[in-house]
């Protein structure tokens, strides 16, 4: 029996090195005992001797196996090391073994990897930092209880997301700390080590209660995505029970209340989101543009137009659709009989992406990660405004709205249902009309027809 002791529960490098040596020695999975630190060995029993170093030709494995192993190592199943090693031996004999989706071992490991990724997503979504001040220094501290050994693997996300903050994440397994330059670890913590709240939470609760829409409440779906075990760590979830209990009465009041009567809470919530967006660092584009260009328009708008990104003039003015494309857009709306003042206009990406050519800043198309990073702001705007119709102007806006790349030709000219109950329409971006050389008049006329149909549909929904 061979014994392998790993440094910690998610010691991928230690497992990889030991697995390579053992595979070169031809050691069967049943003759290896894997354990962590001073922990108890897994179901294959206690080992007697550490594996000697193996001198043999290097061998390669498919990249998907490496990615799978990195995730599975973080699972809490004590058999994970042995299961991965068994698959490694199989891949050495059958390089395409992972392609057999019906294989029970492959299925089990893929399921474990999915559970780890889901737990990592929960950590991204449900960590809530509280401000703590000690000896004149501000630090942000959060408490989280992961299901799997994901804290080290997830640290990079928080370093990138909160690079300028001094923060700590405490968990029952280990704690991680960032001082703006260095990431460090410390032993496990208990819930009492984390603060209970700070003054910012009252503002956050006001915002959350303002955007809560009882007409769209789906309790089972909500608790599936946000299990109750995380509720005690998040300030907004203290309101969930009360909001659910009062949902029916609130829905009835919403039906009786005119859409034109926008309360102070909704305006305050929108202003809070806009203020937060001004400091957005969700992607690298904040380093490029002059400022965040947020949406504008009435909060009871029946039509929300979503463009691609601010241009040069929008970036300088801090307002959407004020440049050449915006002026053409205004003319087309007027020709279509749609009053722009009554609509809400915004962009899928809130910062100007450009390339310098001499003194000029030339528009550069946003890429997938940049669009995805900015979807948070579009979602917040749609939650607050709840437009019956959202119009994607161009492919970038359509990708943001639908969460995937789509073609304008396949989506144009008709309504598409969206999960929140509204409708989505797709047409070209007005900048397209500035670039087109052939049939410009016909393309403009078609664009006006799209806007007119959208305007008539908004009237019908009213």
Image (spheres, grey):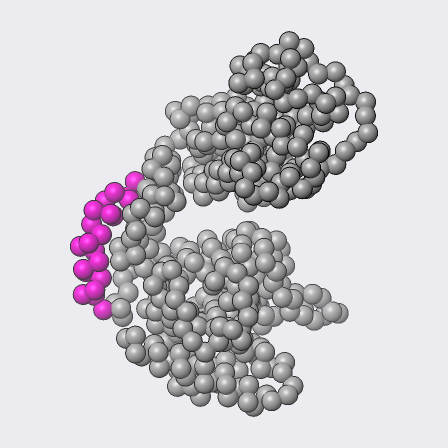
Left or right of 252, for residue 17: right
Left or right of 140, for residue 29: right
- Residue drawn at point x = 61 percent, y = 20 percent: 30
The quarter of the displayed image where residue 26 is located: top right
Query: Is residue 201 visible to the viewer in this orientation of the structure?
Result: no
User: Can you say whether 30 is above or below 348 in the image?
Assistant: above
- Residue drawn at point x = 41 percent, y = 83 percent: 452
Query: Is residue 388 visible to the viewer in this orientation of the structure?
Result: yes
Magenta highlight on residue 97 = no
Residue 462 drawn at (x, y percent)? 28, 75
Residue 374 drawn at (x, y percent)? 52, 57
In the rendered picture of this protein, how many numbered marks are placed on residues? 0
- Residue drawn at point x = 63 percent, y = 36 percent: 181
Identify which residue, 107 or 449, lies in the foreground: 107
Q: Which residues are magenta?
A: 238-258
Left or right of 257, for residue 300: right
- Residue drawn at point x = 36 percent, y = 39 percent: 227
User: Can you say whether 186 is above or below 97 in the image?
Assistant: above
Residue 60 drawn at (x, y percent)? 74, 36
The quadrant of the rendering that contains the N terminus is: top right
Residue 457 drawn at (x, y percent)? 35, 78
Magenta highlight on residue 254 = yes
The quarter of the displayed image where residue 407 is located: bottom right
């Amino acid at each position: 029996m061979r014994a392998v002791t790993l440094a910690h529960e998610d010691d991928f490098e230690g497992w990889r090195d030991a697995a390579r040596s053992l595979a070169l020695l031809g050691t069967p999975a049943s003759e290896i005992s894997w354990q962590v630190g001073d922990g108890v060995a897994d179901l294959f029993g206690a080992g007697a001797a550490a594996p000697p170093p193996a001198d043999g030709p290097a061998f390669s494995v498919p990249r998907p196996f490496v990615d799978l192993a990195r995730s599975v190592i973080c699972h809490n199943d004590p058999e994970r090391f042995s299961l991965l090693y068994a698959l490694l031996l199989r891949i050495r004999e059958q390089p395409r073994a992972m392609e057999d989706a019906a294989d029970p071992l492959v299925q089990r490991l893929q399921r474990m990897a999915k559970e780890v990724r889901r737990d990592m997503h929960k950590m991204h979504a449900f960590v809530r930092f509280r401000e703590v001040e000690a000896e004149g220094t501000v630090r942000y501290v959060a408490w989280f209880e992961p299901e799997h050994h994901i804290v080290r693997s997830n640290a990079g996300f928080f370093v990138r997301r909160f690079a300028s903050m001094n923060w700590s994440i405490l968990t029952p397994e280990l704690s991680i700390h960032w001082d703006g330059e260095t990431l460090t670890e410390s032993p496990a913590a208990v819930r009492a080590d984390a603060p209970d709240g700070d003054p910012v939470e009252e503002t956050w609760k006001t915002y959350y209660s303002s955007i809560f829409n009882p007409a769209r409440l789906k309790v089972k779906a909500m608790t599936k995505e946000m299990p109750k075990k995380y509720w005690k760590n998040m300030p907004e979830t203290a309101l969930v029970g009360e909001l659910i209990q009062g949902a029916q009465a609130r829905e009835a009041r919403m039906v009786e209340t005119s859409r034109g009567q926008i309360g102070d809470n909704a305006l305050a919530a929108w202003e809070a989101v806009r203020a937060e967006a001004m400091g957005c660092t969700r992607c690298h584009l904040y380093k490029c543009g002059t400022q965040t260009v947020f949406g504008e328009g009435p909060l009871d708008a029946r039509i929300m137009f979503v463009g691609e990104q601010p241009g040069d003039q929008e970036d300088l003015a801090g307002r959407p659709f004020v440049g050449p494309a915006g002026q053409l857009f205004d003319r087309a709306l007027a020709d279509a009989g749609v009053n722009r003042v009554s609509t809400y206009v915004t962009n899928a990406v809130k910062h100007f992406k450009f390339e310098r050519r001499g003194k000029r800043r030339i528009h550069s198309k946003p890429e997938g990660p940049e669009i995805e990073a900015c979807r948070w702001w579009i979602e917040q705007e749609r939650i607050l405004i709840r437009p019956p119709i959202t119009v994607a102007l161009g492919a970038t806006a359509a990708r943001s709205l639908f969460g995937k790349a789509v073609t304008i030709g396949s989506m144009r000219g008709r309504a598409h249902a969206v999960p929140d109950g509204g409708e989505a329409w797709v047409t070209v971006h007005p900048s397209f009309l500035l670039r087109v050389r052939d049939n410009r008049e016909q393309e403009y006329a078609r664009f006006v027809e799209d806007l007119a149909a959208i305007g008539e549909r908004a009237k019908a929904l009213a």
